[in-house]
Image: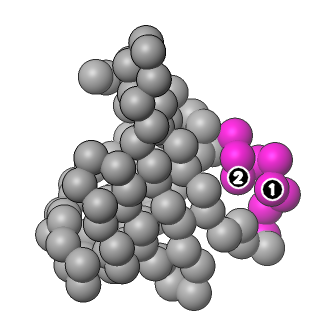
């Protein structure tokens, strides 16, 4: 879960989300800088030496949120994809 977050949603603006296990056993800061914004369509950002894009795609049944990211080398692409998908699934339940 996210215990704190700051967002300056503009090109050049920074974000930081503190992610922690609910039992407090592990945590990390997910931080970066926004590099491009198209309102209601796309958010692009860099985090470390990696980048990601979030797309908001209108469909007949609502909006699809698609995240594309540069994978890191510690965990398999499948593990990373599952982690990012879990974040999107939790967001969907929340909204």
Q: In this view, does 64 lie above or below 12?
A: above
Q: Which of 23 and 71 is in front in this view?
A: 71
Task: Check the picture and name the quadrant holding the C terminus.
Answer: top left
Q: How crowded is mark 2: few (under 14 residues within 10 Å), some or many (20 or more)?
A: some
Q: In this view, does 19 lie to the left or right of 95?
A: right
Q: Where is residue 82 in the image (x, y as percent from the top left)?
A: 69, 40
Question: Residue at the location (50% across, 61% down)?
Answer: 53
Question: Residue at the location (29% across, 61% down)?
Answer: 38
Q: Where is residue 89 in the image (x, y as percent from the top left)?
A: 50, 27
Q: In this view, does 47 lie to the left or right of 69?
A: left
Query: Contact, CB < 8 Å: mark 2 with mark 1?
Result: yes
Residue 47 circle label: none
Q: In this view, does 74 lie to the left or right of 90?
A: right
Q: Position of residue 59 (x, y in %)?
A: 45, 23
Most common secondary structure along the magenta stretch: helix
79 within the magenta span:
yes
Question: Residue at the location (71% across, 67% down)?
Answer: 71
Q: How is the image coloured?
A: one colour
**Residue corresponding to mark 1:** 77
Q: Where does the magenta region start and end?
A: 74-82
**Residue corresponding to mark 2:** 80
Secondary structure under tag 2 reads helix
What is the CA distance from the residue labelled 2 to the residue labelled 1?
5 Å
Give the number of callouts: 2
Residue 28 in view (yes/no) = yes
Question: Residue at the location (77% across, 48% down)?
Answer: 79
Q: How crowded is mark 1: few (under 14 residues within 10 Å), some or many (20 or more)?
A: few
Q: Is residue 9 above or below residue 64?
A: below
Q: Is residue 4 above or below residue 60?
A: below
Q: Position of residue 19 (x, y in %)?
A: 40, 54
48 within the magenta span:
no
């Amino acid at each position: 879960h996210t215990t704190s977050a700051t967002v300056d949603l503009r090109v050049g603006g920074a974000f930081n989300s503190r992610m922690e296990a609910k039992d407090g056993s592990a945590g990390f800061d997910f931080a970066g800088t926004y590099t491009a914004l198209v309102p209601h369509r796309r958010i692009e950002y860099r985090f470390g030496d990696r980048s990601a894009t979030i797309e908001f795609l209108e469909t007949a049944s609502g909006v699809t949120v698609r995240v594309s990211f540069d994978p890191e080398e510690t965990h398999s692409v499948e593990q990373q994809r599952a982690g990012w998908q879990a974040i999107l699934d939790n967001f969907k339940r929340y909204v």
